[in-house]
Image (cartoon, helix red, strand yellow):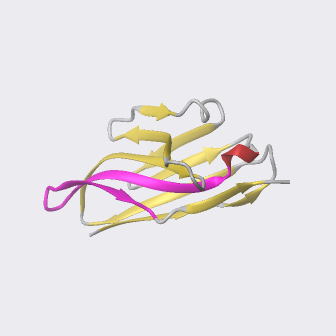
Amino acid sequence: QVQLVESGGGLVQPGGSLRLSCLASGSIFWINAMGWYRQTPGKQRELVAAITGGGSINYADSAKGRFTISRDKNTVYLQMDSLKPEDTAVYYCNAEITTSALRRSDYWGKGTQVTVSS
């Protein structure tokens, strides 16, 4: 079994910063990639940023220059600066993991709310 647990969401004023964290735990053999997605009511979940096991990084256009993804072992971080009201969403951690049984699957966290408002 694999679990992803997010933390770090909350309420912040426009222009402020937040740092999200996501820890992957369980029967993990290898983490192929980790990333962050976000979703607002009535819209599809969208990629914010992702980082592969080899360190390649991909950002959504809306995140470039303001958000920074990083990873330390089984934890992925999303540093969000210069936050805007349109960044308000539930942020989900995602990981593509090869388990100890050598099965490769996608896993999701339960999500953490980020609200940007004055």
Location of residue 52 by image quarter: top left
Q: Is residue 7 magenta?
A: no
Tell which residue pokes out farthest to the front in this image: 42
Residue 8 seen in the current view? no
Which residue is painted at 60% across and 36% down in the image? 63
Front residue of this view, candidates 48 and 26: 48
Q: Main secondary structure of the magenta part?
A: strand
Is residue 94 shown to the viewer in this render?
yes
Magenta highlight range: 88-109
Q: At x 60% / y 30%, what residue is drawn? A: 64
User: Along the horizontal axis of the image, is 77 left or right of 118?
Assistant: left
Q: Is residue 52 above or below residue 5?
A: above
| Position in image of residue 99 (x %, y %) | 21, 59
Q: Where in the figure is residue 50, as x and y percent of width and height?
A: 44, 40
**The C terminus lies in quadrant:** bottom right
> Was residue 105 drawn as part of the magenta stretch in this picture?
yes
**Exactly how many numbered labels are in the figure?**
0
**Where is residue 114 shown, x and y percent of the image?**
66, 57
Q: Residue at x 61, y 39 (%)?
A: 67
The outermost residue toward the left is 101
Give the position of the N terminus as an image quadrant: bottom left
Instruction: Name the residue at the right extreme.
Output: 118
Q: Position of residue 82 (x, y in %)?
A: 74, 40
Question: In terms of image quadrants, where is residue 108?
Answer: bottom left
Residue at x 39% of width, y 35% of height: 55
